[in-house]
Amino acid sequence: MSPNYSVFSLEGKLALITGGGSGIGFDIARCMVQAGGSVVITGRREQPLQEAIATLGERAHYMVNDVTERALLNGLVERIETTYGPIDILVNNAGINMKKPALEVTDEDFDRIVHTNLNSVFSLTRACAQRMMARQRGSIIMISSMAAYYGIDRVAAYAASKSGVEGMVKVLASEFSGNGVRVNAIAPGFIETAMSKTAMGGDPDRFARAMRRTPMGKFGQPEDIGWAAVFLASEAAKYITGASLPVDGGNSIGF
Ligand code: NDP
């Protein structure tokens, strides 16, 4: 019997990927296009991205949007659906981090991180889920973090936001499953992007410590998250909802 990979295909499906102009989000978009899907990528930046997005081909589109402007998210979804058709897949990827000892974190720092990584995720998910549920189909993927699993120093606000996302996934999965909408998380370990480079601060000791906690002994690449997202969005994962999938080189084994 010849292999049949069509259950992994995203052909005919449209994905909205927040913060997809760089890092993990860009590779989620790239992998989804390679799997046959179309993507609408959002981000705050305007110009430099158009060229990068163009390398993905004609099934990739870019719209400027700041996820923290929550009152505009419903309009964004409406604009995308009017222009490109129904959104089948939402990937809540946009996120920010900041490393500071907890006692140095101001209320403004804390609010900014939770607002971007958690509050906006809820607003955009609600806007998409209403439409997906009416159509009885959809897949929502949250990009969480190992910081939701472990007490990692100096990321109090980030960990709080990602733990909130993990909790939300289970509740939404339960509430939406009767209407054909699945909700899952991917929890990346150390993935080589601008965010992780800033977090390491070029400090070889910090890097060595991170690698000691990673049985595979190396950073993951953004496409490792990309292919996991393709899987969760595809028919191959049709019985998976409410899950959090670690993609972390074994980090979550916790040895
Ligand atoms: P990057 O900093 O490389 O990319 C973050 C992306 O989010 C950028 O494209 C940025 O685009 C976008 N973004 C940030 N704020 C906003 C906003 N308010 N509105 C819209 N877009 C925004 O980070 P990564 O690719 O590393 O991270 C992606 C996700 O993965 C995040 O949720 C992060 O928490 C998570 N993660 C990453 C890990 C890693 O090791 N790298 C580990 C665990 C989780 P722009 O500036 O144009 O807005």
Image (cartoon, rainbow, N blue to C red):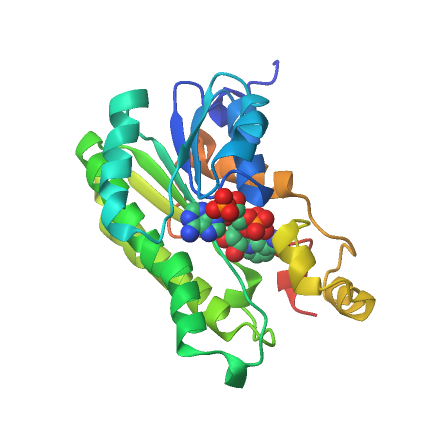
Q: Could you tell me which quadrant the N terminus lies in? A: top right
Q: Quadrant of residue 178?
A: top left
Q: Is residue 140 left or right of residue 126?
A: right
Query: Between 159 and 109, which is closer to the camera in this rendering?
Result: 109
Assign the C terminus to one quadrant of the image: bottom right
| x and y percentages locating residue 70 in the rendered image | 28, 52
Q: Position of residue 241 (x, y in %)?
A: 38, 47
Q: Residue at x 23, y 52 (%)?
A: 175
As drawn, which residue projects farthest toward the bottom? 103
- Identity of the residue drawn at 27% across and 44% down: 73
**Left or right of 52: which side holds 221?**
right
Q: Is residue 79 left or right of residue 224?
A: left
With respect to residue 167, does 12 lie above or below? above
Percent of width and height locating residue 108: 40, 73
Closest to the observer, 206 or 180: 206
The residue sitting at the left extreme is 134
Question: Against 121, is 29 above or below?
Answer: above
Q: How many marks?
A: 0
- Residue 55 is drawn in which quadrant? top right
Q: Residue at x 60, y 18 (%)?
A: 3
